[in-house]
Image: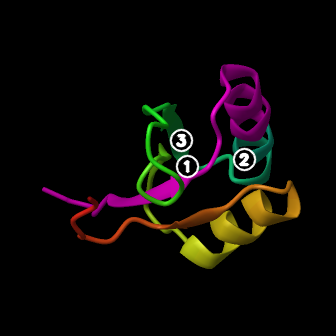
Amino acid sequence: MSYYLIMVEVFITNIKLENQAIAVLESLESDFPDLLINFDLEDFQAPYPCGHSILRVEGKSINPQSIINCLRLKGFECEVLVDKICH
C-alpha cells in the first residue's frame, strides 16, 4: 500500500471582492496546475491583517513564497496565516 502526503498552506490576503478572488484564482490555477486552490472571503470589519480573506492551497509540494509573490505582483497583500489573536 502506498501513501503520499498532501500539504496544506493557508494564507491571509486583502482581497475583498469576489471578482478579484476569481481573477487571482484563475491566475494561480494557471501558474500552479498541480495545486488545489480556493478562497474564503471574510468580513472586513477590521483592517488588514485582522480583516482578511483566506486563500487555501493544497498539494504535494507548495512553495509559499511563490504564492505570496504572485499575489503581490497583482497588487494584493498576502502572507502565511499564523496563529495570533486580533482585537
Q: Which residue is mark 1?
A: 35
Q: Disc count in the image?
A: 3
Q: Amino acid at mark 2?
A: Leu
Q: Earlier in the sequence, mark 1 or mark 2?
A: 2
Side of 69 relative to 60 (left or right): right
**Residue 50 circle label:** none
Q: Is residue 23 above or below residue 80?
A: above
Side of 44 relative to 81 (left or right): right
Please say if the residues under marks 3 and 2 sit with CB atoms less than 8 Å apart.
yes
Is disc 3 placed on a helix, strand or loop? strand
Please say if the residues under marks 1 and 2 sit with CB atoms less than 8 Å apart.
yes
Is disc 1 placed on a helix, strand or loop? loop
**Residue 28 circle label:** 2
Residue 17, percent across and down?
A: 68, 26
Look at discs 3 and 1 and give the one toward the viewer. Answer: 3
For this rendering, which residue is in front, 39 or 37?
Answer: 39
